[in-house]
Structures are given as C-alpha cells and as structure tokens.
Image: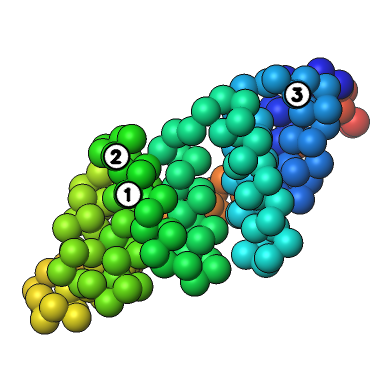
Amino acid sequence: DSARMQQLMAERLINAGDLKGAIVHYRKAMAADPRLPGMHFELAEAFLESSNQTAEQVEALKELDAAVGSEGDNSRIECAYGRIAALQGKFDEALMHYQRAYKMDPNSGEAQFGMGKTLADQNKPDEAMKYLRMAVQTDPMNASAHYRLTRVCRDLHLDEEAQKEMKLFQEVRLAKDHLAQLYSEMNRRPVPGDDDLTEPQP
C-alpha cells in the first residue's frame, strides 16, 4: 500500500492501456504521500489520455495547477496546458503555452510539435513548417508530426517533401502498431509464480 508501489502499479496499468485503473492507483499514491514527486503531472496526463471530454480536461487542469504549485512550472506542464487549450479551440492560448514550453526547452519535441500543429490550425503553414520539421528531426517516431508536416507541405505545394513525409508516417504507424501488438501479447502472458513452479501432471 505504499505510495511508491501504488505509483508503480499505475505506471504498469498505463503501459497496459488501462487508464482508468491507473487513475485509481495514482490517487491512492497521492493519498499515501501527497509530496511524492511528479504525481500531479502523471495524473493529469492519465486524465488527458483517457478522454478528450470536458470533465477529464477539468480534472487534468486541476492536477496541472497543483503540479505547478508544488514543484514549479516546466516545459512538459506547459505542453499539457497547450494541449487542453487546443482541445477547447483556444488556439491563441495554446500557442502561448507551447511558446513558453519551447522557451523553457528548445529541444523538446513535444513543444516543437505543439507549436507547429497550432500554427497549422491557425492557417499559418509557413510558420508551422519550421517547427514541424524540427519535431520530426527530434523524434523521428512521432507519426503525428510526420502527418501534420505532410499536410503543411501539400498546402505549400511542396509535393516531393509531402510524399516523403507521408511514406514516413505510414512506416512509423505500421511499426508502432506492430510494437503495440507485441506489448499486448507480452502483457497477456502469466507472470511467473507458484502456479508455474508446480510439477507437471503425468
């Protein structure tokens, strides 16, 4: 029942795709030790990954505010604020948060992608191009960044680059689907325990 054990259980459930179960264990972890580092942010992320509905956004915002209050602001928190603002259609506010995140950490692929995506949503393809190109260089496995860059290249009539990015998007998505399937199969396998140590029946 320790806070750390509850946190580890939550992280395991996140990897297994059980976000609602993870939220339960994150709450138990914070109840056991409210000062455990990073918990408010992790819980906010779990809410955002579980649903794009308003209720989850409200809960995520509460946890992000708590994270800033207890541990201070950082690039990842600003990106989460930006994501929520974008989901709510507040693109100017989203861009402000992503710009702040980028200023805090210019090497953050999440901040780069957030800026590029938001600028594209504001019909500013020329500006979006710069940050989306950064994002795919920082994280070549970011399928969403390749897809967004494809769309921006098409808007700017950069057909050759658009074809290249679409091919990369398809390859990355296929690879990630394959990895997800492998991980799911691994999680279905029984953990070695007493049952595995019994002698086989004749």
Number of labels in the image equals 3
Tag 2 near tag 1, CB within 8 Å: yes
> Label 1 crowding class (10 Å Cα cut-off): few <14, some 14-19, many 20+?
many
Where does residue 165 sit, x and y in percent of width and height? 21, 66
Q: Residue at x 81, y 41 (%)?
A: 24
Q: Is residue 100 left or right of residue 20?
A: left
Could you tell me which secondary element the residue under label 1 belongs to? helix
Answer above or below: position of 79 versus 56. above
User: Which amino acid is tagged 2?
Assistant: Lys
Tell me if 111 is positioned left or right of 182 in this view.
left
> Looking at the image, is mark 3 or mark 1 earlier in the sequence?
3
**How is the structure coloured here?**
rainbow
Whether residue 191 sits left or right of residue 41 in the image: it is right
Residue with the mark numbered 1: 99
Give the amino acid at mark 3. Answer: Pro
Residue nearest the viewer, comparing 48 with 166? 48
Q: Residues within 10 Å of mark 3 (few under 14, many from 20)?
A: some
Seen from the viewer's position, the closer of residues 20 and 107 is: 107
To which quarter of the image does residue 168 belong? bottom left
Q: Nearer the viewer, residue 143 or 42?
A: 42
As drawn, 200 above or below 90:
above
> In the picture provided, is 74 more to the left or to the right than 107?
right
Look at mark 2 in the image and give the residue it sits on: 103
What is the three-letter code of the residue carrying label 1? Answer: Gln
Spatial CA span between label 2 and label 1: 6 Å
Question: Could you tell me residue 177's position as x and y percent?
Answer: 47, 58
State whether residue 75 appears in this view. yes
Name the residue at the right extreme.
201
- Could you say whether the residue bearing mark 2 is in a helix, strand or loop? helix
Disc 3 designates what residue?
34
Label 3: which secondary element: loop
Which sits in the foreground, 184 or 158?
158
